[in-house]
Amino acid sequence: SFGREKKIADESKKLGLPGHITARGRSQETSDNMIRTACILASATAFVGSAPARARAPAPRATESLPEGEYEYRIGIVGDLHVDPRDLEHTMIGRDDMKKHNPDFIVSLGDLGESKDCTESKQLYAGTTECFKLVREYFDGFGVPFDVVGGNHDLEGIDEFNTDKENLEAYLSHLGKDTPHFCHEIAPKTLIMGLGSTKFRDATYTSHEVFVDAEQVAWFEETVAKHPADEGWSIFCFSHAPIIGSGVRVLQENHVVNGCCWLNHNGGPGAAPQRFIETVRNSPQIKGWFNGHFHLSHDYEDSITFPTIDPSEGPYPNRGSCVFAQTGCMTARSSRDGRRHSRFLRGNEYGFEICTVDHSKGGVIRLDATVTYSDECAADGSESCSTLVFAHDHEDYDHDLWFQAYVPQEGDGCYIEDPNGTINPAGSRFEDVGNPETVCWWHMKDGAVLGVHNGMIIEYDASTLAPLGMVVSRDELHGRRVAVVDNGYGGSTVILYDDGNNSEVTVVQPNEDGTYWRKVVRNKMHRTREMRNVKAAKAFIEKTLPDQEHDVMSSYGPYISTVGQVMGVSTKALPFKADDTQKLTKSR
């Protein structure tokens, strides 16, 4: 990371910008000081991103806050609501807290209802008409315009609606929307754009993937292109899940391995997950992107991530000119870490501020980051303007709960260049790949990126190096050697073997689509039906043969379980031929 921060400092000098301004306003001109402080978000840190010149009146020099009272827009951003009609106290307090700051507009990041039986109807509450009506009444209570992007639970009314189409139509109708996406001009030359999930029953794998259909993706790309930065436009984007390449904190053992971490995590025709970050990289008018989904508060260094290098300098970690911000939950019931947060966005033609509304402290607002559009532009427009981002220090950055997913970085000392043979031989630094502390990564010849982290083999996206999912589980990797060998046909093969068991060698086969991470989580719709059938079978056999104990089993077509979570699932190998089953059983 020091190399990237040096680039930031050099870019500052090239553009004639101050090297760094701390929360106390002191200028630190040397690149050494900037490098030292820029590595820790707990100090007010300046980052530089580029944007084409904007035609406007001269802006003041970048400061750590925008002029008080000159905001052109104030947007309240509500994370995962998960409204439960039996427990509305924190939900109502959260609305009152937000109203204290006089928002002009409210954006909800989806997951509107609790995914439980909240009405003693034996049905999930999320995604039902009753849920939509209550949430609509709640949003109307803000007294200002609002809009919503659908999350992974918002089409979960599986007993009321037979299809995703029917469920989506009810969702749109009750919330007063024409489409799952939205676009509003909330100030001159300032757009807010939202993308909503449209799949649950029809999901190929996990129903909790936040999936934006190809029609929305095309609309998003076209709308962004029609509002270019060189005409003075600024765009803020909203989606339930973050986009791949955003760099925000994610939960490896939940959303990553289950294939529901990123927007369009599993992809699809016209809806590849990489398309969003590609649009961001090519569109300096996109200034901010807000997500929910993880139920994490804002008290982590990577709850906000910044444009760290100029887009011309390379593909990673190129985040264009965009600041990405995680959004928490306003209820303790939904928060993973007990902290109750919402976001607040306010700004004008000179920049914007990203804030936290802390519901556990009476709705007090906390300034997290200030983005100032610099006036350092060439008169003829031949050079780009810069964007300065200040991350403000605050006392709540004193903890590091929730294990952070590892993201490979060039120069991190963990990269294995041109792997050929065993990557963890005895006595090497990577010997114990089953140790959660062991980290390494490498490229396969087909361009795929694999790595060892937290006792598993993980696949990473080749463009952004964001984690995609689990390839080899802990039980399969523990105590084994990992080899990468040429397959004789221009590709490479991953092999697992044991020093003390020469009869068992595992070939880690890629999926049919060329990826390696294991897409084993089944659609929740199917799993729910199967579990209900099992429950019915248990009730029947207990009534029919009450004096006996019974194990209720299930038979399947191509599946062997009702997998709903990857963690705990083994990736242990199967024999290549059916005749090898007996030998495999003996070796186990």
Image (tube, rainbow, N blue to C red):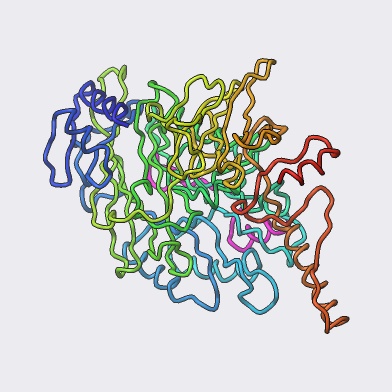
Q: Look at the image and tell me in which quarter the N terminus lies.
A: top left
In the rendered view, tell whether residue 448 sits above or below residue 81.
above
At 64% across and 63% down in the image, what residue appears?
A: 127
How many marks are shown on the rendered structure?
A: 0
Q: Is residue 314 left or right of residue 506?
A: left
Q: Can residue 5 be seen in this view?
A: yes
Q: Which of 380 and 514 is in front in this view?
A: 514
> Residue furthest toward the front?
500
The single residue placed furthest to the left in the displayed view is 26
Q: Is residue 226 visible?
A: no
The residue closer to the viewer here, 393 or 161, is 393
Start-end of magenta stretch: 166-193
Please indicate whether residue 103 sits to the left or right of residue 543 in the image.
Answer: left
Q: List x then y, in percent, for residue 90.
A: 43, 72
Between 164 and 42, which is closer to the camera in this rendering?
A: 42
Q: In which quarter of the image is residue 321?
A: top left
Residue 317, position as x, y percentages in the image: 41, 31
Identify the residue at horizontal 81%, vertical 61% (top origin). 554
Q: Quadrant of residue 506?
A: top right
At 61% from the left and 37% from the top, the residue drawn is 500
Residue 173 is one of the magenta-drawn residues = yes
* Left or right: residue 579 compared with residue 356: right
Q: Any magenta on residue 336?
A: no
Q: Could you say where residue 148 lies in the image, as x and y percent from the top left?
A: 53, 55
Q: Up-down: is 549 above or below 166?
A: below
Residue 299: x percent and y percent? 34, 55
